[in-house]
Amino acid sequence: MANELILIVEDNEKNRKLARDILQVKNYRTIEAETGEAGLELASKERPDMVLMDIQLPGINGIEALKRLRESESTRAIPVLAFTASVMPQDRREIMDAGFDGFVAKPINLKEFVAAIAAALGKDAAGGG
């Protein structure tokens, strides 16, 4: 049973809509922000079960936003997945070294996306198989 609240921090409207649509079909609730600053504010106010964080954002980037989430007592335990088109090995290493709980590449591979979300929330994505 899903129903967890997921904050999508993504400045590209099409990527945000795609992520939202997939998550809602899987029975997750979603809230959205277009900037790192707005994402921090929503995370603090709404306390989502997970954050899906783009790296290239207007204002502060996703890595800085993650750092600030980790510095706050109220948001430090929230799992945060990097949601990015930066998929070169050195980019991925830098992102994971920053402390993200996982990585979801764009464009979205549906099966990998759903599995990464489930893993970050400590669930079995498919119930086996």
Image (cartoon, rainbow, N blue to C red):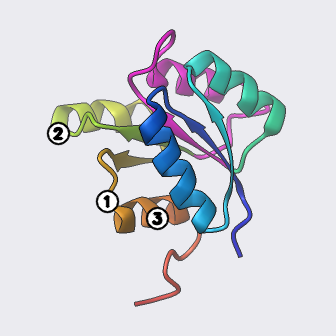
Nearer to us in this view, 22 or 44: 22
Which stretch appears magenta?
50-79
Specify the amino acid type for callout 3: Val
Would you call the spot at circle 3 few (<14 residues within 10 Å), some (14-19), or many (20 or more)? some
Q: Residue at x 18, y 32 (%)?
A: 90
Which residue type does callout 2 highlight?
Pro
For the residue pair 39 and 21, the one nearer the viewer reads as 21
Q: Is residue 57 magenta?
A: yes
The residue that mark 2 highlights is 89
Mark 2 and mark 3: span between their CA atoms?
A: 22 Å
Q: Compare marks 2 and 3 and give the one earlier in the sequence.
A: 2
- Please say if 29 is above or below 8: below
Residue under pointer 1? 109
Spatial distance from mark 1 to mark 2, Cα to Cα? Answer: 18 Å
In the picture as drawn, the residue positioned furthest to the bottom comes out as 129
Q: Is residue 120 visible?
A: no
Residue occupying image coordinates x 44% and y 67%? 115
Residue placed most toward the observer, 62 or 16: 16
Q: Is residue 128 above or below residue 87?
A: below
Quarter of the rendering occupied by the C terminus:
bottom left
